């Protein structure tokens, strides 16, 4: 479902590769990278590294916020350049199994949403680097043992209904301040529709799982 059009200059600073025609806004979208850093991990044990899809789900559910990099739609010299920003995310309330879907709470006033209106394709990286897990183990954020997941897909607006209700519960339960954000900013729920999954959680190189394996895994 398309994002709302942006007719106003960006006033907030916040979060959202391979170009695709159509997508959310019915025109060519520009690539972007979203980096999510886990903040909720350490509440459960990470699965064995051989269970790749389960590790990916664990990292996704452990992530409270992320750094999102888009291809900038701003005026030159920034246009087409990488542009990183911070977003709060959630795939479900803490203590639940999680959905595996990264949800976000966005506004068309957000500068990165301007970029998304030009390109909805995204890469999303989520890492256990900000959790107690890596800190207790003494793992550097760049170490393969400090597990991270890279998703690619398309950022989509969540239509009103059951899924939007779930996205609200998922996000507001982890980020209660969202409920007090200015209503005149016309906030809406969005998600990354995942099409590819890469996992680095051990030595020997990156591994891949299909979206079906990822969503079927028991986290």
Image: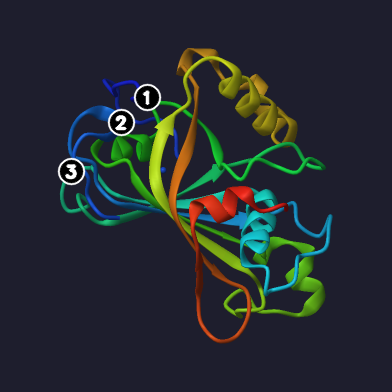
Query: Do the residues bearing badges 3 and 1 touch, measured as CB atoms within 8 Å?
Result: no
Separation of disc 1 and disc 2 at Cα? 6 Å
Separation of disc 3 and disc 1 at Cα? 27 Å
Query: Do the residues bearing badges 1 and 2 touch, measured as CB atoms within 8 Å?
Result: yes
* Percent x, y of residue 25: 26, 28
Taking the image as shown, residue 139 lies to the left or right of residue 102, namely right
Identity of the residue furthest to the bottom in this view: 204
Q: Is residue 55 above or below residue 102?
A: below
Q: Earlier in the sequence, mark 3 or mark 1?
A: 1
Which mark is nearer the camera, 3 or 1? 1
Q: Earlier in the sequence, mark 3 or mark 2?
A: 2
Residue 75 has which mark? 3
Q: Earlier in the sequence, mark 1 or mark 2?
A: 1
* Percent x, y of residue 151: 47, 56
Residue placed under numbered mark 2 in the picture = 24
- Crowd around label 1: few <14 · some 14–19 · many ≥20 (10 Å): few
Of residues 136 and 46, the one nearer the viewer is 46
Q: Is residue 30 above or below residue 113?
A: below
Q: Residue at x 76, y 72 (%)?
A: 135
Can residue 20 be seen here? The reply is yes
Residue placed under numbered mark 1 in the picture = 1
Q: Is residue 122 above or below residue 47?
A: above
Q: How is the image coloured?
A: rainbow
- Crowd around label 2: few <14 · some 14–19 · many ≥20 (10 Å): many
Task: Determine the secondary structure under disc 1.
Answer: loop
Q: Residue at x 59, y 48 (%)?
A: 215
* Percent x, y of residue 183: 54, 14
Task: Determine the secondary structure under disc 3.
Answer: loop
Query: Do the residues bearing badges 3 and 2 touch, measured as CB atoms within 8 Å?
Result: no
**Marker count (numbered):** 3
Q: Residue at x 30, y 40 (%)?
A: 115
Task: Determine the secondary structure under disc 2.
Answer: helix
């Amino acid at each position: 479902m398309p994002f709302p059009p942006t007719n106003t200059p960006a006033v907030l600073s916040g979060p959202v590769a391979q170009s695709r025609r159509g997508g959310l806004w019915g025109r060519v979208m520009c690539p972007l990278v979203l980096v999510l850093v886990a903040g909720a991990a350490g509440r459960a044990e990470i699965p064995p590294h051989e269970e790749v899809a389960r590790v990916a789900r664990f990292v996704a559910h452990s992530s409270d916020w992320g750094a999102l990099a888009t291809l900038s739609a701003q005026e030159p010299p920034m246009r087409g350049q990488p542009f990183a920003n911070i977003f709060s995310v959630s795939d479900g309330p803490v203590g639940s199994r999680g959905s595996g879907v990264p949800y976000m709470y966005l506004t068309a006033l957000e500068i990165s949403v301007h970029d998304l209106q030009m390109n909805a394709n995204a890469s999303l990286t989520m890492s256990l680097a900000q959790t107690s897990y890596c800190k207790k183990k003494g793992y550097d954020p760049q170490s393969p043992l400090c597990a991270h997941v890279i998703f690619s897909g398309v950022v989509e607006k969540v239509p009103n209904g059951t899924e939007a209700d779930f996205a609200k519960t998922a996000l507001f339960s982890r980020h209660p301040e969202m409920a007090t954000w200015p209503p005149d900013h016309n906030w809406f729920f969005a998600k990354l529709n995942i099409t590819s999954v890469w996992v680095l959680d051990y030595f020997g190189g990156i591994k891949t799982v299909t979206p079906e394996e990822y969503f079927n895994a028991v986290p």
